[in-house]
Image (tube, rainbow, N blue to C red):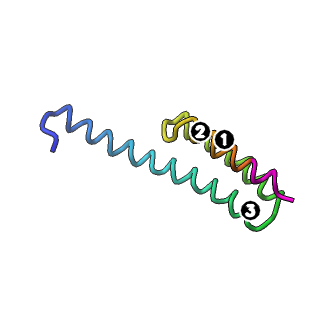
Amino acid sequence: MANTRSAKKMVRKIERRTEVNKARRSRVRTFVRKVEEAIASGDKTAAAEAFKAAQPELMRAVTKGVMHKNTSARKVSRLAARVKSMA
C-alpha cells in the first residue's frame, strides 16, 4: 500500500487514467468488431464504411497512448486487406 502523500495521489491518478484507457480500448474493439461482422456477413459496402470509421479510431488510440503505433498500423493493414479481398 502507498505510504507517502504523493504515492497515494499517484494511485488515485492511475485509477482514473485506467478507467479512461479501458473505455478507449473498448471503443476501439467495438469499431473493429463492426468491421469484422460486416466482413463475415459478406457485405462489402458495409465493411468499407465500417473500416472507414474504425481507421481513425485505431489511430486515435495511438495518440492517446492506449495502443502502440505499430500495433494499430498492423490492425489497420490487416483489416484493409480483408475488406479489399472481398469479392
Tag 1 residue: 56
Crowd band around label 2 with a 10 angstrom C-alpha radius: few (<14), some (14–19), many (20+): some
Crowd band around label 3 with a 10 angstrom C-alpha radius: few (<14), some (14–19), many (20+): some
**Residue 7 picture location, percent across and down:** 20, 35
Secondary structure category for the residue under label 1: helix
Q: Nearer the viewer, mark 3 or mark 2?
A: 3
Q: Earlier in the sequence, mark 3 or mark 1?
A: 3
Tag 2 residue: 60
Q: Mark 2 belongs to which amino acid? A: Arg
Residue range (magenta): 81-87
Q: Mark 1 belongs to which amino acid? A: Pro
**Residue 42 picture location, percent across and down:** 80, 65
Q: Earlier in the sequence, mark 3 or mark 2?
A: 3
Q: Mark 3 belongs to which amino acid? A: Ala
In the rendered image, the residue lying farthest to the top is 6
Dots 2 and 1: beta carbons under 8 Å?
A: yes
Image quadrant where one finds the C terminus? bottom right
